[in-house]
Amino acid sequence: MEFSAFLRWIGLASQKELAAKLGTSDSNVSKWVAGRGYPSFELVAKLLLLGMSIEELFDKEVADKVKV
């Protein structure tokens, strides 16, 4: 699922709203979307609870390493 589609799916309109929901900055969320960084493990857990998959959060190489 594309990130903007994910935001709409969970009822949010912007990266800023997601940042507020997760307790982080919108610049952090922007970095994840642009592929310039990854969320902390705590935030990964929150995103997974919101319905995003490991594959959607990370590129394939990282996702394969994260899967248990």
Image (tube, rainbow, N blue to C red):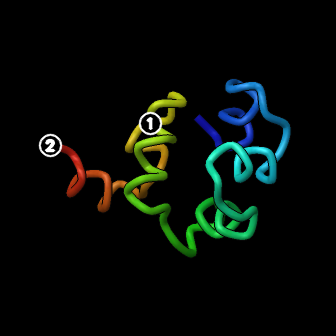
Near-viewer residue (25 or 8) = 25
Q: Residue 67: horizontal and vertical position, in percent? A: 21, 45
- To which residue does mark 1 refer? 48
Left/right placement of residue 3 relative to residue 4 reads left
Left-right relation of 49 to 12:
left
**In which image quadrant can residue 55 be found?**
top left
* Quarter of the figure with the C terminus: top left
Residue occupied by mark 2 = 68
Residue 56 appears left or right of 66: right
**In the rendered view, would you say 23 is above or below 56?**
below
- CA–CA distance between discs 1 and 2? 14 Å
Which residue occupies 38% across, 43% down?
54
Q: Name the outermost residue toward the bottom.
A: 36
Q: Nearer the viewer, residue 38 or 59?
A: 38
Residue 24: image location, x then y, percent:
65, 60
* Quarter occupied by residue 7: top right
Of the residues shown, which amino acid type is indicated by label 1?
Leu
The residue located at (71%, 64%) in the rendering is 25
From this viewpoint, which residue is outermost toward the right? 13
Image position of 17 with respect to 65: above or below: above
| Residue depicted at x 50% and y 35% | 52
Q: Nearer the viewer, mark 1 or mark 2?
A: 1
Report whether 63 appears left or right of 56.
left
Q: Amino acid at mark 2?
A: Val
Label 1: how many residues lie within 10 Å, few (<14), some (14-19) or many (20+)? few
Q: Position of residue 29 (x, y in %)?
A: 66, 60
Up-down relation of residue 11 to residue 56 (above or below): above
Secondary structure of residue under mark 1:
helix
Per the image, label 2 sits on a secondary structure element best described as: loop
Locate residue 17, reporting x and y percent: 79, 45
Farthest residue in the front direction?
23
